Amino acid sequence: MAKKKLDKASMPCNKPRRSPNPDKKKVVKACANGQEKIIHFGATGYGHNYSGAARRNFRARHGCDKSPSKLSAKYWACRNLWSSGGESRKPGSKGGTYRGK
């Protein structure tokens, strides 16, 4: 499957959205210290268990509290996919996510 080309100029800074890359969940144009970088993060092949225990485990395992740079995939995965709160998400069939209430 061909990857779509992203228009970096039209993307807003620091606003994650769905990635056109079939291997990644999200994409963001990260802007920090006068630099801009397109970052794809979150593997699509894995379902997620968004329970509180799973969030704590992921955040501890990846060192999310160590304030990485906005220009890293680690920062965006910790902040966008695994931060506390947000809408309820449950694992779906075949590794997808269900966004229900």
Image: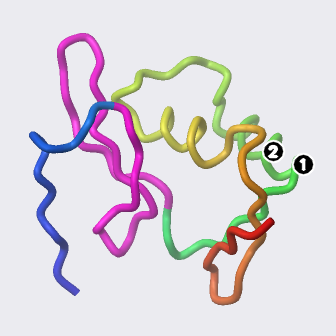
In the image, residue 83 above or below residue 71 = below
Furthest residue toward front: 101
Which mark is drawn over residue 20?
Answer: none
Which mark is drawn over residue 57?
Answer: 2
Quadrant including the C terminus? bottom right
Q: Position of residue 22 (x, y in %)?
A: 34, 75
Dominant SS of magenta comes to strand
Front position among marks 1 and 2: 1
Quadrant including the N terminus? bottom left
Q: Where is residue 81 in the image (x, y as percent from the top left)?
A: 60, 49
Which residue is rendered at x = 15% and y = 57% of the image? 6
Task: Give the extent of the magenta segment.
Answer: 14-42
Furthest residue toward right: 53
Q: Position of residue 44 (x, y in %)?
A: 50, 71
Left or right: where does residue 16 sit relative to residue 1?
A: right
Which residue is rendered at x = 65% and y = 73% of the image? 97
Q: Alpha-carbon neighbours of circle 2 within 10 Å: few (<14), some, or many (≥20)? A: few
Left or right: where does residue 51 sit relative to residue 92?
A: right
In the image, residue 5 above or below residue 96 = above
Query: Along the line of sight, which residue is nearer the eye, 11 or 35?
Result: 11
Q: Quadrant of residue 94?
A: bottom right
In the image, residue 92 above or below residue 57 = below
Dots 1, 2 in contact, CB < 8 A: yes
Which structural element holds mark 2?
A: helix
Disc 1 marks a residue whose amino acid type is Ala
Q: Where is residue 37 in the image (x, y as percent from the top left)?
A: 22, 35
Disc 2 marks a residue whose amino acid type is Asn
Left or right: where does residue 47 sit relative to residue 50?
A: left
Which residue corresponds to mark 1? 53
How far apart, in angstroms, are the residues tagged by discs 1 and 2?
6 Å
In the image, residue 53 above or below residue 12 = below
